[in-house]
Amino acid sequence: MKIKTTLRKNTRFSEEKILQILECFCSDFRADFTAKYLKINRKTINDWYMYIRNAIYWHQEEEKKQLFSGTVEVDESYFWPRRVRWKRWRWAGNKIKVFWILERWWKVYTEIVPNCEADTLLPIIRWKVTLEDTVVNSDGWTSYNALVDIGAMKHYRVHHSKNEFARGKQHINGMESFWSYAKGRMAKSNGIRKEYFLLHLKESEFRYNCMRTWTKMKKTLIKILRKFTKQLL
């Protein structure tokens, strides 16, 4: 029997049961643990987790319209696919390249990019950051050479290759913290299929931005599910 709820159309779960699933999701429980804990079929929990991740993706797509300012950190990193047996090289397949922008003490934005060249990264920074009011912190990657030329108020670098990680307030430690957090979360899943990588990346972005309070995450997720119910049919 289908039950009417504002959190998902055509579901047999009551709103109370959906809230229990949301609580487990917010606590970052794995799907297998949630299935045992709530005594629900594992495939059903997998479906719900994917439904929630899709809702988060649409929410983050709307959030990306907000500009960053003040002090920001930028960085690029690579995620490797799962190692494949019998392949000659250590890692099979292409690495996934991710570009990150962090507004210090506030939010992070992530984007999968085809490469980490200046022609790719600088337009993203110009689009996402109000450069004339912003201090940009980066590592020594050459793609950031023209940041001041395109309007950044100030641009500071830390050269990791020279064993330099901070000069007072000039660092990208916030970005490194998020990078470590995201990779650690994804490692818990024992491998993520490439087609779902973006959803997990945006989930990590959302969780990091809501990290200050678990209660805020749950309330925000309820609002998100109610807002995007029609898009998620």
Image (spheres, grey):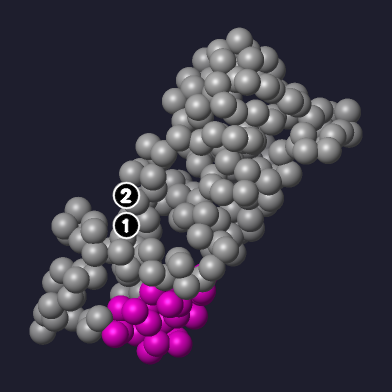
Residue drawn at x 51%, y 36% as measured from the top left: 68
Residue 31 visible (yes or no): no
Asked if the magenta segment contains residue 27, the reply would be yes
Residue drawn at x 32%, y 49% as measured from the top left: 58
Q: Residues within 10 Å of mark 1 (few under 14, many from 20)?
A: many
Q: On screen, 230 above or below 130? A: below
Give x and y (percent) for residue 50.
35, 62
User: Are the two marked residues, 1 and 2, in contact with CB atoms closer than 8 angstroms?
Assistant: yes
Asked if the magenta segment contains residue 132, the reply would be no
Q: CA distance from mark 1 to mark 2?
A: 5 Å
Residue beneath label 2, please? 58
Give x and y (percent) for residue 32.
46, 77
In depth, the one of 144 and 98 nearer the eye is 144
Q: On screen, 186 above or below 60? A: below
In depth, the one of 87 and 213 nearer the eye is 213
- SS under mark 1: helix
In this picture, which residue range is highlighted in magenta?
Answer: 16-43
Task: Tell me, for residue 82, which label it has, or none.
Answer: none
Quadrant including the C terminus: bottom left
- SS under mark 2: helix
| Residue type marked 2 | Trp
In depth, the one of 173 and 188 nearer the eye is 173
Residue drawn at x 54%, y 45% as measured from the top left: 108
Give x and y (percent) for residue 204.
52, 55
Residue 159 visible (yes or no): yes
Q: Quadrant of residue 1?
A: bottom left
The single residue placed furthest to the top in the displayed view is 149
For this view, does 78 lie left or right of residue 27?
Answer: right
| Residue type marked 1 | Ala
Residue beneath label 1, please? 55
| Magenta portion: prevailing SS class | helix
